[in-house]
Image (cartoon, rainbow, N blue to C red):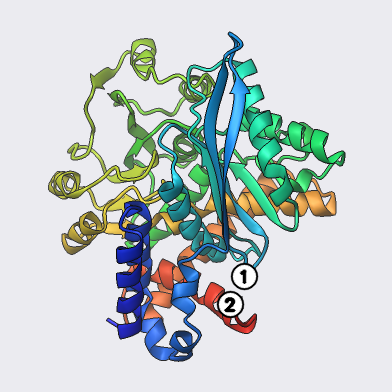
Amino acid sequence: MNKYVEEVIAYVENKYAHQPEFVQTVEEVFTSIAPVVDRHPEYEKADLLRRMVEPERMFRFRVVWTDDQGNTRTNVGYRCQFNGAIGPYKGGLRFRDNVNESLIKFLGFEQTFKNSLTGQPIGGAKGGSDFDPAGKSDGEIMRFCQSFMTALYRYIGPDIDVPAGDIGVGSREIGYLYGQYRRLKGTFENGVITGKGLSYGGSLIRPEATGYGAIYYLQEVLKHENDTIGGKKIAVSGYGNVSWGIMKKAAQLGAKVTYMSGSAGYIHDEEGISTPEKLQFILDLRASNSKDLKSYADRFGCEFYPNQTFWGADDVDIYMPAATQNEVGMEEAKKIVASGARYYLEVSNMPTSNKAIEYMKSNGIIVAPSKAVNAGGVGVSALEMSQNSERLSWTEEEVDAMLKRMMKGIYAKSVEAAKRYGLGYDLIAGGNIAGFEKVAEAMMEQGLF
């Protein structure tokens, strides 16, 4: 490996040992881009990599709100504006009780290269809070969102930083956040946040976009293997908007999701989660912030397996982890290899340990990285920004077609980058290189920043 790359990885491992998620993603990206640095000695002279691992700015703030009983509650909010070299900062807000500085920092770093892959002029950011909407009333969620935005609004704007939704932040939360922003600023800057409702500047298919994009990327992988999606059985973790989008698009293309998991267990639906009734049930379950996945099994007569995971099921063609980080380690990877599945596409951010990825790849499984597979969501968010700035209104078919072209382009760029550096058909290395090159070029052209 390039000596300079090794030095920066060691720097991160030493300085940020208390932030394991961040260390893992830096190791994964920088190991892949070592051949690029070999060809560009000027990167070391400009200390480009060390600059890349430090956020341009990061905010931590107190969020105080009142519950329905009138009690004062306090949470912590974050916004990491990681890299704005190619455009305004862009990235989601996550509301979940496990949100901390390490998590937000790693997500912001990943977002920088993911956004670069889309081809859109957007930089990388991430934010959120350790507030969990599950079990909270609408009034409590509204009051929290209003307090959160009161602390954040000074640091965002259509040409500065454009947040969006993520885990725990759906259309309801986005509406409350934007309403407070409009109240504070006194202007209708609907380009300041994405994932909005259609009535005030949102984009069609935005809730489905990440899942749709993942399936479009999958189609390109299958095409490379002279395979097709028709008849394929898919296992997804999670049942939020991302998984719902995967289920919906897979059903349209003749495949079916047969396994779905939550924090309390998983369901196995041999018929597939593919009918309009089942898809609507998943949507309603997500909107209610319920963690009761057993209710799906009760409603549709399939099996629920409490406190278990489905990794290693022997009737799955494609695994698509789509819930959260750190889902699959070596134990799960060995089960997946033993199951005989051929494809493993990361959809959530960093669901897999680096060792687990290498084990699956070395045993013949085609692995695709989240920063490429899940880029459709932020890609459609960028399209929403364009619609807002130009006062456009695209149809669902138009947005879907643009999303499909975008995902095909991301796949093609990843394959080409890996081949250019003699790495063969390596989607992970190719995605990292393709995302890195654009950001690196922009940073070098802008001088020391």
Looking at the picture, which amino acid does disc 1 mark?
Answer: Ala
Q: Secondary structure at mark 1?
A: loop
Between 223 and 352, the one lying in front of the other is 352
Badge 1 or badge 2: first in the primary sequence: 1
Bin the neighbour count of mark 1 within 10 Å (Cα to Cα): few under 14, some 14-19, many 20 and up.
many
Query: Which element carries disc 2, helix, strand or loop?
Result: helix
Residue drawn at 67 percent across, 65 percent down: 87
Which residue has dot 2 on it? 443
Residue at coordinates 81% horizontally, 53% vertically from top-left?
389
Q: Which quarter of the rendered picture does the C terminus lie within?
A: bottom right
Residue 203, image x and y in percent?
70, 42
| Residue drawn at (43%, 59%) of the image | 220
- Could you tell me the amino acid type at mark 2? Met
CB within 8 Å, label 1 to label 2: yes
Which residue matches tag 1?
A: 85
Residue 343: assigned label: none
